[in-house]
Amino acid sequence: FLFLALNGTSVCGTGIEDTGEPSLLRFMCAELTRGYFLEHNEAKYMERREKVYTCMRVPKELEKLMLFGFFLCLDAFLYVFTLLPLRTLLALLRLLTVPCCGLGSSRFLQPAQVCDLLKGLIMVLCCSMMHYIDYAMMYHLIRGQSIIKLYIIYNMLEVADRLFSSFGQDILDALYWTATEPKSRKRAHIGVIPHFIMAVFYVFLHAILIMVQASTLNVAFNSHNKSLLTIMMSNNFVEIKGSVFKKFEKNNLFQMSNSDIKERFTNYALLLIVCLRNMEQFSWNPDHLWVLLPDAFMVVTSEVTVDIVKHAFITKFNDITADVYREYKASLAFELVSSRQQNAYTDYSDSVARRMGFIPLPLAVLVRHFIQSRVLSPLSVCCSSTWGNSDHSFTAPPTLTEDTAWDHTHLGFFSPPVPFMQITVKCK
């Protein structure tokens, strides 16, 4: 039967009478000898092939954009520690050297100098207020929660961070414009001081929010089982479900790309803070670094994988080419060049904050607080020891001895380290 069918022999040649009625034999012959021509729908198949090529090009173009945006955020972040203090000092010197300068001396300053002074004051006040925040208590409070509660807390912190970033830049912009608005115009604001107070409280609360995020991530790293860290990383894949099946235009994709750049930079900063805190607790032992690297690599890999898959399918479903990421990069570069002009409309760090939603002041306050608390004034547990027949004893802070987790911490050398603990051995 197969021989006759493949050689084009009619059904009648098989000895079976061809009555013209449907039969199993006629159906099998038709299915085995049926042909089709793809060139009849050439445009459709070429379009499908281009979509495959676009998905293959998206990871490369996306990561180039992410790398460029990462360095933009890094530049804006380092600006707070390098150029901003110098600019603030110059503005302060000009303010002090102008004769007859009083409360209304801002008219002797350029608008950019007024903004620099405001940023410097916000940094000083927020850093002073951060000294009253006990990271150790926050760490152990978070550590004592269940995995489900920590998962909910982590999701709430992500949402709160986006809301703070969205509304925070509006608060800062309102302060800058209120302080530099021409006096000839009719007053339509509540005053500089109320705006300044709102800006200080915003930066302070946002810095605390980032500290809680770092504490939650630190608890996940130091947990005996990695179930919490796995759950937190799997939460990234929820973004794929919530994004790929939505309608996206080029402008919407640009906004999402900027949000991903900001999120990736913030996560890398949190990872760096967590790794440094853990390394400091283990006396900068390089062997402990190899314990942290697998978890850090898992966090970074999940973040990159989610971004690639998300953008690949968004471009596929919305017929957007991979060349659009070059346009995004050119747009960011144009804004960078424009903000460097002599008569620019805005400061460079503010331009990055408006475009990407990354506000460097809260993160800078947290990093500065971390450096000072770990290097300049570390809280220590004094341990006295003598050699020979002498006794060995140590004293712990009352808050530490009352902690139920004290018998599990072992002075921070074994299981999850106590962030505020440092041992000083005095030998006679």
Image (cartoon, rainbow, N blue to C red):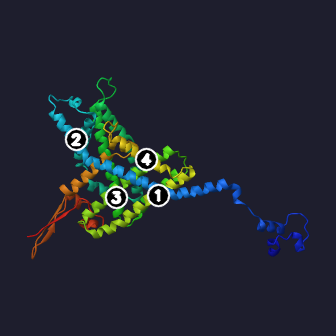
User: Reading the chain from its start, which is encountered first: label 4 or label 1?
Assistant: 1
Residue position marked by numbered label 2 in the rendering:
88
In this view, the mark in front (1 or 3) = 1
How far apart, in angstroms, are the residues tagged by discs 1 and 2?
A: 40 Å
Position of 388 with respect to 44 (left or right) is left
The residue at the point 20 percent across, 58 percent down is: 398
Residue position marked by numbered label 3 in the rendering:
271
Q: Secondary structure at mark 2?
A: helix
Q: Nearer the viewer, residue 409 or 188?
A: 188
Q: Secondary structure at mark 1?
A: helix
The reply to whether callout 1 and callout 2 are in contact (CB within 8 Å) is no
User: Reading the chain from its start, which is encountered first: label 4 or label 3?
Assistant: 3
Mark 4 residue type? Ala
Residue position marked by numbered label 4 in the rendering:
330
291 up-or-down from 97: above or below: below
How far apart, in angstroms, are the residues tagged by discs 4 and 3?
A: 29 Å
Q: Give neighbour class at mark 4: few <14, some 14-19, many 20+ (Cα, 10 Å).
A: few
The residue at the point 90 percent across, 74 percent down is: 15
